[in-house]
Image (spheres, rainbow, N blue to C red):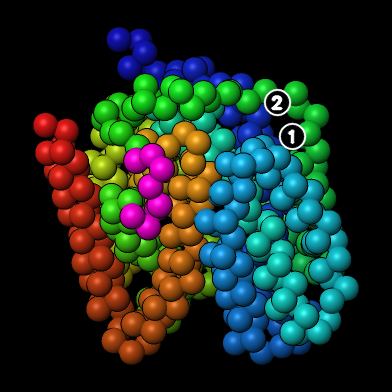
Amino acid sequence: MIVKMNPWKGLKGIPRSVWLLAFATLINRSGTMVIPFLALYMTKGIGVTVSEAGLVLTFYGAGALVTAPFVGKIADKIGALRVMKISLICTGVMLFFYPFITSYYLILAYTFLWSVIGEAFRPANLSLISNETEPEQRKTAFALNRLAINLGMSIGPVIGGFLSQINFHLLFYIDGLTSVLAGIFLIFSNFETKQIALSDFDKETSKEELKPVRNVSILKDHRFLLFMITLILVNIVFFQHIGPMPIFLVDDLGFQQSTFGVLMAVNTILIIFIEVPLNNMMANWDDRTASAVAALLCGIGFGAMAFADSFFAIVLTIIIWTFGEMIFFPAATSYTSAISPPDRRGEYMGYFQMTFSLALMIGPWLGTVVLDSAGSVVLWIGTFVFSLISAISFLVMKKRENKQMI
């Protein structure tokens, strides 16, 4: 009974290696300040137009999209930990030189290359966490990883805001330094990875007794392909808080720009204090059921914005979709880990990460287009429809897979 009343207790069983990864992530993310201010740097520091600044971010997203599936395979061959070390060190060095590039087209090319190298960290990180944990630990482990990310992101952009008023170049130097420090930490942290014997492949199953598909191309793994398509739909909804949501709050509801930052703090605070214990309590939930519930909460939260017209109403919608976010990302990552062969986890995690990159490229742009052409009511009702389709798809996947087990 005491265990159930202490939702943080599950962290005690998380392997030391996962804690080391989380700390390295915290170091790296605490210096994340270039991406949040990159568009502003391009317009104020380089002097390009807003649309040209947006194209720089598109190139970064394209780099992340390209690198995800390939770096996963590389991680499977040379080791995920080695990929992370190389990514962190090289990314830090590249950021040191970024401020010295003034040609717009060179910046586009350099940003693409920076993204390819920097975003290599993500699928390798997810793959290693999967390998280092037992199936019943993974939701909590992935939630711990997201806690480190959000703690860091609550520090980096705030400091970056002050540094940008002094000199934009400082953002690149601090961001680069923390990236190098995170890499050095992993190099000297006496990190011992868990060895997975391929002969144990057939013994490893998730708590739902899902069998990974071995020696089959991902493009022929229909279960994973359907899962990725479903992921893209709900991720497009999640990313509406980046593009159309601030415009909706300022232009449609008349809030101040600073109010958006306050509202986003609600999301971050909830994640920091609730996500880990929430996923620890849901450790025995079926990943597909949890994903369906999360998608539905996401749809209700964003969809309710069609009827929200006050500050507190918006806060309530954010709380709802944040709970969806906190459930969705660990559950979706855990499911990917469960259906991927141990010797190909990097490859699967790479494609998994690619769905987020693709949604990031499509979601904010699509949302702003709908908001501009059809209005906010159509936009937010549309997010509910997208999320509902995703929720139903997750449940259909579970039903089909359960039938195949009988």
Q: Residue 60, how many percent across, how many down?
A: 62, 69
Mark 2 → mark 1, Cα distance in angstroms: 7 Å
Is residue 275 in the magenta section?
no
Depth order, front residue of 230/323: 230
Which of pointers 2 and 1 lies earlier in the amino acid sequence? 1
Q: Is residue 215 magenta?
A: yes
Quarter of the figure with the C terminus: top left
Disc 2 and disc 1 in contact, CB within 8 angstroms: yes
Q: Is residue 393 left or right of residue 93?
A: left
102 or 298: which is nearer to us? 102
Task: Give percent across and percent down for residue 199.
Answer: 46, 23
Q: Which residue bears the numbered disc 1?
A: 186
Q: Residues within 10 Å of mark 2 (few under 14, many from 20)?
A: some
Q: Is residue 374 above or below residue 77?
A: below
For residue 207, which quarter of the picture? top left
Instruction: Please name the residue shown 20% across and 54% down the image.
Output: 393
| Disc 2 secondary structure class | loop
- Report x, y in % for residue 23: 66, 34
The kind of residue tagged 1 is Leu
Q: Which mark is residue 138?
A: none
Region in magenta? 213-220
Q: Which residue is mark 2?
A: 191
The majority secondary structure of the magenta stretch comes to loop
